Amino acid sequence: MQQRSIETIVPAPQFEEGGGFIVHRPFPTAQIDHLDPFLLLDEMGPVTYGKGEAIGAPDHPHRGFETVTYLLAGEMQHRDSAGHAGGLRPGDVQWMTAGAGVVHSEMPSDHMMREGGAMHGFQIWVNLPRADKMARPRYQEIPSERIPTWRSADGRVSIKVISGKVESTHAVIETHTPIVFLHLTLEPGASFTQSIEAGFNAFAFVFDGTLEAGGSIGVVRPHTAVVFRHDGDAVTIRAARDEHPLQALLLAGKPIGEAVARYGPFVMNSREELVQAFEDFQSGRMGHIPAEVVH
Ligand code: FE2
């Protein structure tokens, strides 16, 4: 296999989203707008809230893409304009196809709002092709125990296969366009090679431990994205000989190759479609969260 080389390293410094929500965001930033089909990566936290301090994202809309939430620590609850409600615990994944539009809230659980605690996780926005942007909203809610884990023969590499596959270990989540989404844990000094299809954009995001990149880059520390070139058919992730394991996400996807028009929570193909999305939201055509939903 021909290894892909590293194109760029993108630090994701901590900042506060509206309302004081702490994230590390490698893109969209001034350096990278998006990595087709990936529109956004947020590392939520890590943060430890005191009693009554936990915050989330109250009612807001989405149209034209998918939001993927993967929780590592804490508890979240979700409600939407179609009356759907659910919870997320560590290791769970929610793959939401917003499609034509939802209005939803993403908040810490009631228990966490009261008592505080550690919150850490990820939200990734995956674009939809034109033909699927106005699809009916759909949820795939996968509890941790249903996410398959691949382990190397020597036990030094373990991988949660959230979408795509590692060798013969296949994810349970279905995606509109081909997406690989892996959570890698490598013991110090271990390495792992994943084949990546030609033409796919691929990047890793380091969030614990140290990645050994070698060459002029040296090592890559947490809260940093590593974007790969298209010059090979595999990527190798190597953990430095550190005191503790490397943890990273590895994402790859087939580019959609269409125009991206984005404004806040809407991602369409043209400015006119964005205006339409905004009007549909303003006039209530994406619905409201019913007050009587009990979660
Ligand atoms: Fe959202």
Image (tube, rainbow, N blue to C red):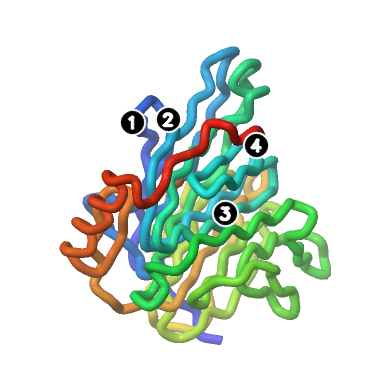
Q: Residue at x 53, y 22 (%)?
A: 54
Query: Residue 72's spot in the image, x, y percent?
Result: 64, 42
Question: What is the distance, in whole Å, between disc 4 and disc 3 at their CAs?
Answer: 15 Å
Q: CA distance from mark 1 to mark 4?
A: 21 Å
Asked whether 60 or 231 is in front, the reply is 60
The disc label shown at residue 18, or none: 1
The residue that disc 3 covers is 248
Dot 4 amino acid type: Ala
Query: What is the distance, in whole Å, between disc 1 and disc 2 at their CAs?
Result: 7 Å
- Tell me: 67 left or right of 230: right
Q: Secondary structure at mark 3?
A: strand
Residue tagged 4: 73
Q: Earlier in the sequence, mark 4 or mark 3?
A: 4
Q: Residue furthest top?
A: 51
Residue 218 placement (x, y as % from top left): 44, 56
Identity, as a three-letter code, of the amino acid under mark 1: Gly
Label 3 – label 1 distance at C-alpha: 26 Å
**Picture quadrant of residue 239:** bottom right
Foreground mark, 2 or 3, reads 2
179 or 284: which is nearer to us? 284
**Residue 66 visible:** yes
Q: Earlier in the sequence, mark 1 or mark 4?
A: 1
Horizontal arrangement in the rendering, residue 165 relative to residue 1 (left or right) = right
Task: Pick the quarter of the image with the C terminus.
Answer: top right
Amino acid at pointer 2: Phe
Q: Which residue is at the front of the view, 100 or 226?
A: 100
Residues at badges 1 and 2 in contact (C-beta under 8 Å)?
Answer: yes
Q: In what element is the residue under mark 1?
A: helix
